[in-house]
Amino acid sequence: MLSRIDRVELFNFKSYSGHVTVGPFKDFTCIVGPNGSGKSNLMDALCFVLSFNSATSLRGHNLTDLIHRGAEQRECFVTVVLRRGATAAAAAGKDVSTEMSFTRSVDRSGQLTHKIDNKPVSLHDFLSALKKFNVCPRVKNFLVFQNDVECVAQKKAQELTELLEQVSGSAELKSEYDRCKEACELANRELYLASTAKREAISTLNQARHHKKEVEKYDETLKQITNEKRDEALVELLHIEKTLIKSKEALTDLTDKLAALEREGTSDRELSSMKHELAEKHRALAEQSNAFRKDNEKLRDMNTTLNRIRHSLRHLSDLRGRKKMELDDALAKESIQASEAERVRGMLNQHKSILSSFEKRCVEEDKNYKTLNNVLTDEQLKEYRQLQKEAGCQTVVLRQQLETVMREQQSLREAKKQCVNFMANVELEKGELVQRVQRGNKYVSEQQNLVKEIRDKVSSITRDIEDKKAELARTERRRKENTEELEKVDEQLKELNFVKVDNKRDAKIADALHTLRSLYNIRGRLVDLCTIPNNKYRHAVTVAFGKNLDAIVVDTSEVAHACVRYLKEHHLPPLTFLPLNSVEGKTVDDRLRILGGTCKPVVDVIRYDISIEAAVRYALGQTLVCDTMAEAKRVAYDQESGERFRVVTVDGTLLMRSGVVQGGLSTVQSRARKWDEKKYNALCEARNRLLNDLEEDSDVKVTQVQNELKNMKYRLDALKTRERNAEAEIETTKKNMENMQNEIKRQEKDLVSMTARKEGYEGRLLKCETEVSEHNGSIKAIEDKIFDEFQKRVNIPNIRELERDDEVRMEKREKFRNEQKVLISQFEILLEGGNSRVGVRSAKEISDEYKKIEEELKRVEGDLSIYTNAVKEVQQRLSDLRTRYAQTKDRLKHLDTEIANRTKRSAGEDVRINYLRKIVMSAEGRNQALRSQRMRVVQRCEMEGVPIPLKPAEAGGSKRQRVADTGDCSFSEPFSLFEENDPSSQQQEQPRRPRHINGTAPSGGKVVIDFSGLPATLKQVASDVAQLTQYKQRTRSLLETLQNTADALAPNMREAARIEYCEQRADTFSAEFEAARVKGDKAHSDFAKIKELRTQRFMETFKKIAHDVGRIYCALTMDTRAHAVHGSACLSLEDNEEPYLGGTRYHATPPMKRYMSMELLSGGERTMAALALLFAVHAVSPTPFFVLDEVDAALDASNVERLANYTRRNCSTTQFIVISLKEQLYHMADMLVGVLKDKSKESSSILTMDLRGYSF
């Protein structure tokens, strides 16, 4: 044995009082003693020095609890003396049998100190010295407390692992292990993220490269498409240019002819002037409409402002009324207060003069008044004072009673006075409250009348608003319906495409027909009385009717004759009349309806009234209609019966029975338009009617109604606001009145209670006066008896009366003086209170506010007058505008009628000029259409990004050669790239500068198209329409193919443009990946090292413990009688790779028993297994001594004997100090230490006995 514990020295430690030495300890020492004697305290002393447990583990709350309770010195210490054996000392090169003491002490403040050999040292030096003795406080495998064995037996697998980690020292590496593991996991995550980012960046880069290739291919395709579109556009533009040149030459010829005709004819200057006036009137009408709309908007804004001013005026008027009432109240109050102040000031002066006169009168009275000092001598005064003292002694009780009654009397008088003053104040406040309630009732009545009046106005305006809304809704609905119907009529007119050509003859015929309708009963023209449901047969029916198409149907021959006479008399063009009572026509034979094919009678394809059937039969007869010419010939001439029919085809070709064929599409078309004339006239009438209705429901009227509606709403809102304000005022006033009435009731109650209290005070005062009179009589009788002889001697009938009169006189004077001073003080306070009232506004302040309101009211009234006049001016201006608008409209109608009439009269003269003008206009239209087509082509190229070779107009020369002369066209006509179609837009807006194609815009803005770069083959194509059509078809097919190719490519331009960014991104992420990989390798290396070191420490300890635990358990359970019988124990790991992360299982099988878990073993069996494990743990890191605290408590005699034998066998290498109560154990020890309780000292005492001289 290298070293052992020699002794333990205790001073005031727990149950050990004073200085106690325990020892010397032998190789096997047992500590015995009764319960509560202090055995465990000795164990705590060893633990206190050698293990550094906390105060709680030493069975205390803090370190001062370790000090003995009865110690005079509030400190303790424990010294453990370790003795190094001869072998150990020789090995250390020191003297034989050296010893070293280790001391830990606690002072009264709980501070710890450490000493080695009574020399203070630091904690680090203390621990280092212990380690030299192989004592490691960290492990504490040399101390086994009373309950530690059971705890070890009940430890779970994870807890055993923690114990092994603590023993092996791997727990010291746990924090570093966790840090490295976390760093490793973080590095793995970063490496994974960097790898993922790198893969994504490389994938994105590959995609960008692929997109770039697709973009390049796509750009080549687009370039080819652009070239094809450019050539196609140039060919089309060249064709347009050539066509335009030819059209301009034809237009020049037509213009020359028209100019010649106009020079030959007469110019209608008056008609031109009228048209100019018509245009001016139209412009004036538009200006008046705009002015009307602006004035309406202005009027609406002004009405809004006017309503706001009126609302402000009403608010200011109400405010003025309230402020006027407040001012009147303030003036009345100030008048009352002024008169009251004047009265108080007069009273103050009066009482001051009374006080001054009283002081003067007192001085005069004192000169003539007799007092005791004047009547008596000094001797007599002295005697009188003596008698007075005697009288005072005899009447002291009566005087005290009298003073008590007088004090009560005085207090009652003050209380009565306060009651009177309080009642007066209450009466005054009540009067004011009554007046305020009366004024409030009057104000509430006025406000209620105002609310009623406002509500009547609100109801009236609400009804007016509803009426206006209904009117506006009806107007909007009519406008919407008329607008929709007008659009339908315009659409029908557009679809009808009817152009009414007015000439003089048609005008005369129309006038004549109108007159005849008014004179006679005529049905109308056949073209107007019949309708064609299917427009397919328009031309056929027109040809079938022939000259009867314009024939007029009348009822009788007499009417027809009368109409003819009227026409002759008035020199009107002749007309054809068909009297229904005399005309006859062939009825259609039914067999004609079954000829087959598309053949049918013309009568069957029209609709007419049955009353005019005779006229229709006369006009059409048995005329048939067929779709084709071949069928018409077959039906007309190739019948088997040889019969011929009058047949007309749908295109207007007439086959007559005689074999004559008549046809002419242009003539038929012009006559067929008459079928549309009736519909056209009806649509025109409907359109005029709708326009008139829309004019009646114009924007002006709608705006006017809307303005009126808005004004009503503004008025309604203002009235509602006034109503809310008035109701709020009424509610507030009622609440105030209710509060005031409650206050009046409360004051009445206070008056009643104060009146009763005052009457009570008066009754008590009468009682006090009676008691005062009685006490004064008693006192006077005693005094008269004492002063009787003295009064006779000094010849004064009643000396007390004389003195009392003097005292009463002085008291009265003082009382009167005090009363006057109090009154003067009160009057001064009243004056000061009246002059400086806190929180009450003066009449001047209210008057200033009233004046400000008056000024504001005058200003608002001025604004109201100004805006009212302005509104009247605007209304008058609107009325004038309305009148001028109506006059202008009437003038427009008159001009329209006059121009129409003059145009009809001059139609015959101007027909040729108009015809040529139409042709010229048509040619100009064609030219403009060609120019527009050219501009559209150029704009289309501009929008599609197709470059067109443009040059300034000067580059094409001032004059271009004719195409017919040269056969070639190198430049186009100069034109502007700015849009010039709408002159009004040029005046109102600046032209937009377009993007110029293939060059910079010239300074003048005129450019020409350069066709010189176009190949000759394409120029030839532009000269031939057929070749141009074929070229366009080929080009369109090629462009479609190229466009499909481009669409199929569909490259991602943005991704292709990001290739540099993708390359940089890939490089960046590659670098980040490399850095993460290096960081991960380092983290893995560090983690592997710490993991290996921790595993190595743990496994080394585990293997030793696992090897020793079986051996030790076998030795502990070896049967003393049969050595072959013993138990077995083993340790196993749940995680072999990282054992410290898993649990450690401990299994022990007692002798002669089957395998079972630790929980099923008995207490003694678990104890033996736990001891085997503890001994095995101690064997791994052996200390020179082993301390056991009653570990044999759960063992039976045989197991205790086995434990004793084991201890005995191993005490040569390890010192055992065992606390035990079992005889089987301690009789085998070398030294026996007995612990007992000394009750006289309240301390534990020690007895020792060396057992080495005794046999077992």
Image: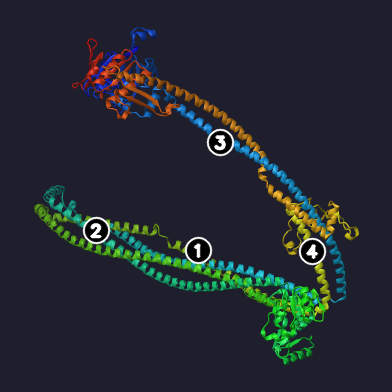
Residue, disc 2: 415
Name the residue carrying label 3.
193
Neighbor class of circle 4 (other Cα within 10 Å; few <14, some 14-19, many 20+) is some
Picture coordinates of residue 12, whole percent (x, y): 26, 21
Q: Are marks 2 and 1 in contact (CB under 8 Å)?
A: no
Q: Quadrant of residue 743?
A: bottom left
Q: CA distance from mark 3 to mark 2?
A: 98 Å
SS of the residue under disc 4: helix
Residue type pointed to by label 1: Lys
Label 1 – label 4 distance at C-alpha: 75 Å
Q: Please name the amino acid that badge 2 sits on.
A: Ala
Q: Nearer the viewer, residue 925 or 595?
A: 595
Q: Would you name the residue on which mark 1 appears?
A: 852
Comparing 8 with 198, the one in front is 198
Do tag 2 and tag 4 residues touch (Cβ < 8 Å)?
no
Camera-nearest residue between 1205 and 840: 1205
SS for dot 1? helix
Report whether 883 appears left or right of 1001.
left
> First in sequence: mark 1 or mark 4?
1
Mark closer to the chain start, 3 or 2: 3
| Residue bearing the label numbered 4 | 928
Q: CA distance from mark 3 to mark 1?
A: 79 Å
Residue in the image at 47% along x and 65% along y: 850
Q: Does dot 2 land on a helix, a strand or a loop?
A: helix
Q: If you read the primary sequence from the N terminus, does the residue marked by circle 2 or circle 4 appear first?
A: 2
Location of residue 1242 with respect to 530 vertically, above or below:
above
Label 3 element class:
helix
Residue lying furthest bottom: 558
Mark 3 Cα shell of 10 Å, populated few (<14), some (14-19), many (≥20): some
The foreground one among 336 and 327 is: 327
C-alpha span from label 2 to label 4: 118 Å
Q: Amino acid at mark 4?
A: Gln
